[in-house]
Amino acid sequence: MEQRKPDTRTVQTLDDLAAFLRDLRSLAGGTPFRRIHTEIRAFYKAQSLLDEPPSLATIHGYFQNGRTRMNPGTVLDIARALGLDGAALRSLEQACHRVLDRVNRSLIIATRDAVPAPTATFTGRRAERDRIAALAAAARDADRPAVIVIEGMAGIGKTELANRAAQDLVDAGLGGDTRLFADLRGYDQLEPPAAADAVVRGFLAHLGVPGRRIDALTPPARAALLHRELASRRALIVLDNASDEAQLEPLLPQRPGAVVLVTSRRRLTGLKDATRLPLGTVAARDALEILRHHDPASRLDAVPEDAMALVELCRALPLELVAVGRQLEAKPDWGIGDHLERLRRIPPHEHSGPVLVSSYDGLPVPVQRLFRFLAIHPGRRFAAEDVGALLETPAAEAQSLLARLYDESLLLRRAEGSYEFHDSVRALATELAHREDPASGQHAAVGRLLRHYRLRLEDTGDGAWLSADRASLLACLHVNDHDEAAAALAVPLNRWLRLLGHYDEARICNQQLLRIARRAGRIDWEADALAGIAEIDRLTGRFAAAAVGFERALRLRRRLGDNAGEAHALRGLAQTASNDDYPVARARYRDALAIHRRLDNAVGEAESLWGLAEIALSAGDLATAAAHAAEVTAICNRIGNDIGEAYGLRAMADVAAEQGDLATATQRYRQAQAICERIGNRRGAAYALCGLARVALREGDLERSERLHSRVLDRCRRIGDIAGEADALRGLAETALARDEFDAAATEFNRALLIYRETGDRAGQVHTLAGLGHAAWAMQRRARARTYWRRALRLADGSGLPAAGALRELTATGA
């Protein structure tokens, strides 16, 4: 029987892609993997492709289920080697981009370290709230976790009940010391369900786990770490809109002390040790109470039969009851019968009944238009300034329109000035938009929004706004038919995410840009993406991967004749080499500096000079370091580049500290810290604070040194800055050494040394080994001390570090 060719239309997930390749290989007679590898290598050679072809192990892995990422180019290479070509290959390429776009969007999730407050109009559900409280108390008494699943149809009030019940638990002392929240997006029409691993990452970050540690683990190991972190805490966790059991399993605590409230439209019968709480419609008494909140004139009580008919038309669903209540409030001159007749004349809507349609129909035309256009907004959070761009409307007018939708209960307000859709309301808005607004108008509106976000990112110093809205901004990169605008947005978005220390999101940003680039065949965008990913690899300690990424970006820049891009790639390579090869790093910086000066690029010139200042400082050439640092500060002050000015000031402070001018060093560190904190640059602020901690140590203020170094350690761990973490640990070790706490010093030195070795930072290793030698000598372990100093001396001699002279004397004479 002839085998049917696999159909790309069925490909929706990464496992589907792997299955497609398996079917293709079977159709080709079970082609050996080595032959596939040989065919791909031959294709690369024939096409003179610069990139390395995938390895045999990589090819084999693409046929296995359970992968978390795939390179579309590798999928196509394998398919081509198995005989796929022409239209079929193009169809597979489209399927790859469709799947990978969905995978990337599933990683965009805004978790919270607090549970949202219930709405002020929440009424009823007393029996359910009491049962949840009793279940939580019983689980505590039985020394086990409580997992309570609130199930029910859309609009029935699951989320509001979970938020109200969470507040009840807090008020009753059952809320624990840790609170976490995530909307799992199980039923969003536009966005895929949130990946469980992305939620785990967010929760671990809220629990204070260093970003570097989170990033280094596999998804199962991350989930295990989350369970260990929660084991020592009494946590209250709300997981809203769960899609299925598989999404929940990695998120549920396994040890006593935790209470988890889950909401889902689905009956999650497969969850072990969970109590399911099916939620029905609200009782008639509670339904009437919801309506009475909006009827101060007591019209409902005057006509009880009509009042009950209103409840029935709302299907006793809280979402619809509140919407009708808003209508009662807005039309005080209408009788209850008038409202009743209006609703009866509207055909039942397939999603939410007549109530939401009635609310929409009663809106002025501009508010109706906003309601529909919010459905095409790529994000889930709406603010007036951004909505104004969507509608081509002033922000003040947009705020008024948003407030009207909120007043009609067609929007939720989670924070002042920030609005969201309920899933059911968004479904109605989406249907109305597709029915009433032309595709060209929708396309133009999204284009305006992307342009607005790009311009705002290029002009902003508002790190708080970007941190709060980063999920919406990342979602904008995944819109269809806006490749130019999305790629233009990705450049400043990547820059700000990186500067603010949101490294996971910066990686997602660049990975999506890479997909857009390859889909559009744009080598310049591909080079931007590769350099962006390489920079995040460098900042998170993946130096080998960073070097490979920057080299690939450099080849593409030179192929394009892009001198500015070439200089940026050279700077990236210089930064990557600066830990262990000063001559190479210095040469790369100088090459980049020459290009930037030729192009009259002041920002690039300052960045290259700053790198040269850092190398000169490490090599003990204080005069050169001071000159370069002063140039950086002057250039950035002239062009109004706050970040560059802050880094220049910090370099000047480093030089002053090495020269013993601690007053000047303190002043400049504080200036740098103030700038970085004002613009939200967490990494720069942490490094300036580390400088102040070192000054305190030099001054002998050991209490202040320990306090500041501990703050630096916490900050660097939170943003995943591995180099800053090592420097902070070394500072704590040197503080302990100054206090004659030798065992504590050795412990912290060893922790720092592990990181310095991981990152290949030779200067850090030299200082840390020297410190271990001093601690060992003080504890009368003379042979061990000299061993440490000899190891430090070998590294210092090999790197041309100024510490070599002092180390040579130590190995000969002792401390």
Image (cartoon, rainbow, N blue to C red):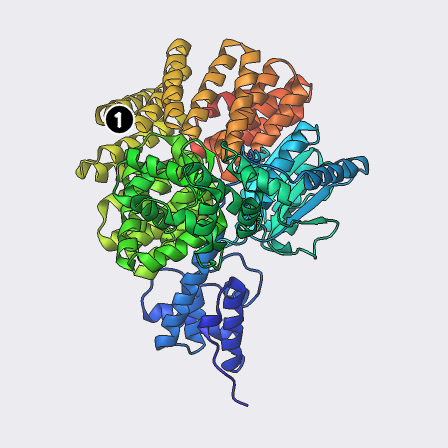
- Nearest the camera: 89 or 459? 459
Q: Which residue is mark 1?
A: 636
- Count of labels shown? 1
Helix, strand or loop status at disc 1: helix
Residue furthest to the front in view is 302
Work out whether 731 lies above or below 703.
Answer: below
Residue 114 placement: quadrant: top right
Position in image of residue 311 (x %, y %): 56, 47
Residue furthest to the bottom in view is 1
Work out whether 235 lies above or below 356.
Answer: above
Q: Residues within 10 Å of mark 1 (few under 14, many from 20)?
A: many
Answer with left or right where residue 693 lies relative to residue 168.
left
Q: Amino acid at mark 1?
A: Cys
Image quadrant holding the C terminus, namely top right
- In this view of the protein, can residue 225 be seen by the observer? no
Image quadrant holding the N terminus, namely bottom right
Residue 638 placement: quadrant: top left
Answer with left or right where residue 201 lies relative to residue 503.
right
Position in image of residue 35 (x %, y %): 48, 75
- Nearest the camera: 308 or 385? 308
Position in image of residue 487 (x %, y %): 31, 50
Work out whether 21 lies above or below 589.
Answer: below
- Nearest the camera: 815 or 114? 114
Answer with left or right where residue 484 lies relative to residue 754.
left
Position in image of residue 65 (x %, y %): 57, 64
- Residue drawn at x 47%, y 30% is 763
- Nearest the camera: 264 or 315? 315
Residue furthest to the right in view is 142
- In this view of the protein, can residue 625 be seen by the observer? yes
- Residue drawn at x 39%, y 14% is 665
